[in-house]
Image (spheres, grey):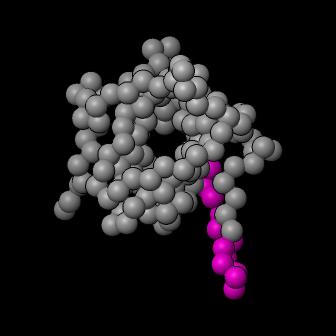
Amino acid sequence: MIEGIKIKKLKVIPDERGRLMEILRHDDADYEKFGQVYITTTYPGVVKAWHLHRKQSDYICCIQGMIKLAVYDARENSSTYKEVNHFYMGIHDPKLICIPAGVYHGWMCISTDEAVIINTPTEAYDYKNPDEERLDPHDINIPFDWRRKDG
C-alpha cells in the first residue's frame, strides 16, 4: 500500500425511511483539515486521470455508481516511490480514501450509470494559482492500464 493512503470503510445505516452514511468527521483519526467540498461526476467508461497536488490531500468518496480509483506515488523521498495501487469503490463498496499530496490519482467509471464522487480536499481551490498538475491518463511513465480486465 502506498505510504499515506488511508481507507475508511463506510457503514450504510438503512431503515424504512431510506439510508444514512457518514463520510468524514472532524473527529476521525485520519482527518487533517477542511478546505472545501465538491461533487464531480464521471460517465461510464470515462477515465479522469492523472491529477497531483503538492499541498492538499484529497478525501474521495463515490456515492453513486462504481469507480476504479488508481494512485501512483511520485514522491521521491517516499518508501513506496513509483508504487501503484488501485481500489474499487462506490455504491456496492462504500469507502473514503485519503490521497496525500504528491500522489498522482484518478479514476474510471466502471458502472453502467454515471458515477458521482464527493471530494473533500484539505485546501480550497485557488483559482489564480491552482495546486494541480495533470498527466494524460495513458502516460507511459505511470505503469497502470485502465482497460477493463475480461475473462
Q: Residue at 36% across / 37% down in the picture?
A: 49
Please state the extent of the stretch shown in magenta in the rendering: 7-19
In depth, the one of 83 and 102 nearer the eye is 102
Placement of 67 over or under 121, stated as above or below = below
| Quadrant where the image shows the C terminus | bottom left
Q: Residue at 54% across / 50% down in the picture?
A: 39
Which of the 4 image quadrants contains residue 14? bottom right
Which of the 4 image quadrants contains residue 113? bottom left
Q: Residue at 45% across / 14% down in the picture?
A: 76
Residue 130 coordinates in the image, percent (x, y): 52, 24
Q: In this view, does 19 lie to the left or right of 92?
A: right
Placement of 97 over or under 79, stated as above or below = below
Residue 84 coordinates in the image, percent (x, y): 38, 34
Which of the 4 image quadrants contains residue 66? bottom left
In depth, the one of 5 and 131 nearer the eye is 131
The residue sitting at the right extreme is 27
What predominant SS class does the magenta segment belong to? strand
Q: Residue at 39% across / 45% down in the picture?
A: 107
